[in-house]
Image (cartoon, grey):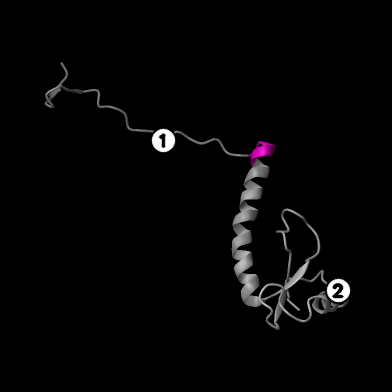
């Protein structure tokens, strides 16, 4: 059992393992397993719904992190918590010189 999934009881773990036939839900390898949510927990909170082998879980989590970040950005935007974008401040034009159409520069009088 994975250390990070403390809310999956031993009985639930065994039931899920038996339901999957003792294999990973994606690649059919035989352990060690991590409990995983089919849809990211940020979308549908609750208990895990499948057991994945360590390599499959790592790959799926890498993809889920991007999806979860997008959901949180959308939630913040809808709640009005986004930061306003600042305009880039330029140094402005020099006030003591003038550039002519022919490309020469002269000092202002």
With 55 as the anchor, is 5 left or right in this view?
right
Q: CA distance from mark 1 to mark 2?
A: 55 Å
Q: Is residue 11 magenta?
A: no
Residue drawn at the location 11% of the way across and 24% of the way down? 102
Q: Residue furthest right?
A: 11
Asked if marks 1 and 2 touch (Cβ < 8 Å), the reply is no
Q: Secondary structure at mark 2?
A: helix
How crowded is the residue under tag 1: few (<14 C-alpha within 10 Å), some, or many (20+)? Answer: few
| Image quarter of residue 14 | bottom right
Q: Which quadrant, please, contains the N terminus?
A: bottom right
Residue 15, position as x, y percentages in the image = 86, 76
Residue drawn at the location 79% of the way across and 71% of the way down? 6
> Which-is-in-front pick, marks 1 and 2?
2
Q: Judge whether 16 appears above or below 103 on screen.
A: below
Q: Which quadrant, please, contains the C terminus?
A: top left
| Image quarter of residue 88 | top left
Residue 96, position as x, y percentages in the image = 21, 23
First along the sequence among labels 1 and 2: 2
Q: Residue tagged by mark 2?
A: 12
Residue drawn at the location 73% of the way across and 63% of the way down? 38
Residue 28, position as x, y percentages in the image = 69, 79
Q: Front-most of 101 and 17? A: 17
- Magenta span: predominant SS is helix
Q: Secondary structure at mark 1?
A: loop
Residue drawn at the location 57% of the way across and 38% of the way down? 83
Q: Residue tagged by mark 1?
A: 88
Residue 69, position as x, y percentages in the image = 62, 53
Q: Front-most of 99 and 10? A: 10
- Tell me which segment is drawn in magenta: 77-81
How crowded is the residue under tag 2: few (<14 C-alpha within 10 Å), some, or many (20+)? Answer: few
Count of numbered labels shown in the rendering: 2
């Amino acid at each position: 059992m994975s250390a990070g999934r403390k809310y999956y009881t031993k009985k639930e773990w065994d039931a899920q393992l038996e339901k999957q036939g003792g294999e990973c839900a994606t690649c059919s390898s035989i352990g060690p397993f991590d409990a995983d949510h089919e849809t990211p927990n940020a979308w549908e909170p609750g208990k895990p719904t499948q057991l994945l082998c360590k390599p499959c879980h790592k790959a799926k989590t890498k993809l889920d992190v991007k999806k979860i970040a997008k959901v949180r950005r959308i939630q913040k935007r809808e709640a009005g918590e986004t930061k306003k974008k600042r305009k880039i401040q330029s140094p402005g034009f020099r006030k003591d010189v003038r550039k002519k159409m022919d490309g020469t520069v002269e000092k202002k009088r």
